[in-house]
Amino acid sequence: MQIGLIGKANVGKSTFFSAATETMVQSGNFPFTTIEPNIGVAYVKTDCACKNLKSRCENSLCFEGTRFVPIKLIDVAGLVPGAHEGKGLGNQFLTDAMQADALIHVVDISGSTDIQGQPVSIGTHDPLEDIKFVEEEFDLWFKQILDREWPKLIKEIEQKRTKISEGLTHRFTGLGINESQVDKILNSLSLKTKKLTEWSDSDIVNFLKSLRKLSKPMLVASNKADLCEELDIIKKISENFTTIPCSAETELLLRKATKAGLIDYISGNNNFSGKQEVNLSNEQNNALHLAKNVLNKIGVTGVQKILNSVVFDVLKMIVVFPVEDDAKLSNKDGQVLPDAKLLSSTSTAKDLAFIIHQDIGKGFLHAIDAKTKQRIGAEHYLKNGDIIKIVSTLSRG
């Protein structure tokens, strides 16, 4: 799974990326700080299956019953108006962003960065403009792709060489869009039986907007919320967009302090604690005091909450724990709950088998629900937190 970090220049995307992945990247107050996309591993938090067991598993990604599950995070180049025409790093930005399953749009909610990504006084720029312009750039890019192929597509359908949904899907295959998504949009807009030659301009625009929203869902990260005198702007944005306030800079500070052994902090928590045996410098004390003030103001830094929300709320993913020994809940080496897999909420036991390994999926016989000890079939829908053993002609043990 890949989540894309998008937004105009200098809104804190690279800081968010560094905080989420603990990977340091270049950042600064000038356009195109990010030129090549930065790719790293971030984690979402969920209850580990061991939480309901007599003893905790010893997995390095489990902390007192909370499991951290890896996802791929990509920080793409900053966006400027006219990106769909190739302005700035537009073509590269759109190509990189479209490879993601979902997008986190990082916005400077404090209004301290203008539409071109240049620093301005706090509160002098409307962040709603940024949200609208990014969506417009994607929509215009989608339209540009379709416009190039429109005459050819009409000809193919008239000659009965393809059907509408298949022909449209083919034009967007490179963006990871599938025919079921296209079909869903065509049906919802009553365009399934309408000839392409009869589509109005508004039909095309509505189709492309709906396709973009379905295939590349977006969550707004209202960054630099700690700089806002009041947070009414977030309430205004939430009327039309899913948004979560955050302070990526504070999250990065807390993670650095934790890594240095100065404090105890788990990402997503609303507090942290100092260590009695550690003597902090005045500079360190001041920085941690500011971090406390941020948490008091917005509750949590928001970075972990955003990652969780885009995976579990926007993409509707579940976590399933595959095991090889359904009695000991372990793999063949005796490691309890060795892995946690992110799957679509509509995934079946056989889907899990293929995710583990293609050969295991091909040799699928049945699965066992380790909690209930019941045998389940290929089409059995999995639930969040399930512990599953796959029985295959090619499975180990």
Image (tube, rainbow, N blue to C red):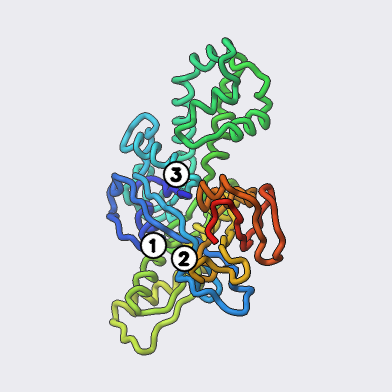
Which residue, given by chain and number where applicable, does mark 3 sit on?
130
Which residue, given by chain and number where applicable, does mark 1 sit on?
19
Where residue 182 appears, as percent x and y from the top left, is 59, 31
Badge 1 density bin: few <14, some 14–19, many ≥20, Cα 10 Å: many
Residue 58 seen in this snapshot? yes
- Identify residue type, mark 2: Thr
For the residues labelled 1 and 3, say whether their Cβ atoms are less than 8 Å apart: no
Name the residue nearer the viewer: 292 or 190: 190
Where residue 308 appears, as percent x and y from the top left, is 53, 59
Name the residue nearer the viewer: 329 or 25: 329
x 50%, y 70%: residue = 335
* Relative vertical location of residue 222 with respect to residue 371 in this rendering, above or below: above
View extreme (top): residue: 159
Image mark for residue 382: none
Name the residue nearer the viewer: 74 or 342: 342
Where residue 311 appears, as percent x and y from the top left, is 54, 54
In the rendered structure, the answer to whether residue 203 lies left or right of residue 359 reads right
Q: Secondary structure at mark 1?
A: helix
Which residue, given by chain and number where applicable, does mark 2 sit on?
301
x 59%, y 25%: residue = 165
x 58%, y 47%: residue = 363
* Relative vertical location of residue 16 with respect to residue 165 in this rendering, above or below: below
- Identify residue type, mark 1: Ala
Position of the C terminus by quadrant: bottom right
